[in-house]
Image (cartoon, rainbow, N blue to C red):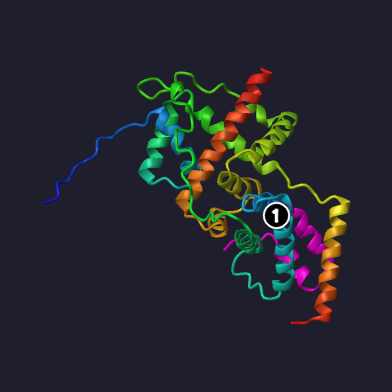
Amino acid sequence: MPEDPDSELVSRLRVGDEGAFAELAGKYQGTMMSMARGYVPSGAVAEEVVQDTWLGVLRGIDRFERRSSFRTWLFRILVNRAISAGVRERRSVPVDDMGPVVDASRFDAGGSWQVPPEPWADQVDDKMIAAKMAARILAAIDELPLQQREVVTLHDVQGLSSEEVCAILDISNVNQRVLLHRGRSKLRQVIASEFGSIR
Amino acid sequence: MTRLRLRPRQSLVCRQAVELVTDYLEGALSRTQRRRFEAHLARCPDCPEYLAQIRAVITLAGSITPDDLTPRMRGEFTGLYRRWRADEAHDPL
């Protein structure tokens, strides 16, 4: 297993360092809130679930055996609590949208691009443009269907491995990739139209 | 009786290639699939840009840092921690 990036913070938390707690909170609170909201009916309940998760972390940190990364453990606690508090059981992966990720009309009868993507990928090397587009991505992630949002946030924003994401969400690797694929494709479209509008 | 049937070496078309991008980037393609995908990229004028755009999206997503706690939130977390410590002291497991 790769080194747990939170290893040091966990050690500090175990010896009662409240600064370590605040640091972990800063790192994960936003993602936890956005995940919890997918399971429960209101923002207020989501806040309770998240707070309850942090209390669970404080109570359990001495027993946390580091067999998984801290963040996998943390998000598992969150998801379990959110499911208990929530109105929906969401363990299965609904096939909510399964069409092609690029509109079929952009290909000719043989399957080659008829309307190819307008090039913009290298413009993202520009720091100013990247900052603007990152803000746009953040907003676009928020609008993804729930499971795509979870997978994209955990994998691409938080940088968790596929194994961690599957363990947290209790989904198969294949499902995880399908969700990632659809989520990223939608984000690409958003950024493409953003570049289209400034062109 | 099983008849050995060799599949014709089909090459990918763009419409198929775009659906394989994530599996490619996540290292989930078989060796044959990966070779086919790369062979397509090498001769397609447009799919490399598509792949580069998906990569750019991943880079952009990875550049988002979760917001640091506002001072108020930091205060709330410190408060939560201290309350827990106090409860713990009164009510040890």
Tag 1: amino acid: Ala
Question: Is B14 above or below relative to A181?
Answer: above
Is A27 in the magenta?
A: yes
Query: Looking at this view, is B9 or A191 the one in front?
Result: A191
| Residue at (53, 23) in percent of width and height | A117
Query: Looking at this view, is A93 or A171 the one in front?
Result: A93
Give neighbour class at mark 1: few <14, some 14-19, many 20+ (Cα, 10 Å).
Answer: many
| Residue at (80, 77) in percent of width and height | B88
x then y, percent, for residue A198: 69, 19
Q: Chain of mark 1?
A: A
Is B2 in the magenta?
A: no
The C terminus of chain A lies in quadrant = top right
Residue A14: quadrant of the picture:
bottom right
Side of B92 where B35 appears, left or right: left
Q: Which residues are magenta?
A: A1-30
The N terminus of chain A lies in quadrant = bottom right
In this figure, which residue is indicated by the disc labeled 1?
A: A46
x then y, percent, for residue A67: 59, 69
Side of A3 where B18 appears, left or right: left
Question: Is A64 above or below relative to A49?
Answer: below
Side of A186 where B36 appears, left or right: left
x then y, percent, for residue A72: 62, 61
Total tally of numbered discs in the picture: 1
Helix, strand or loop at mark 1: helix
x then y, percent, for residue A21: 79, 63
In terms of secondary structure, what is the magenta stretch mainly?
helix
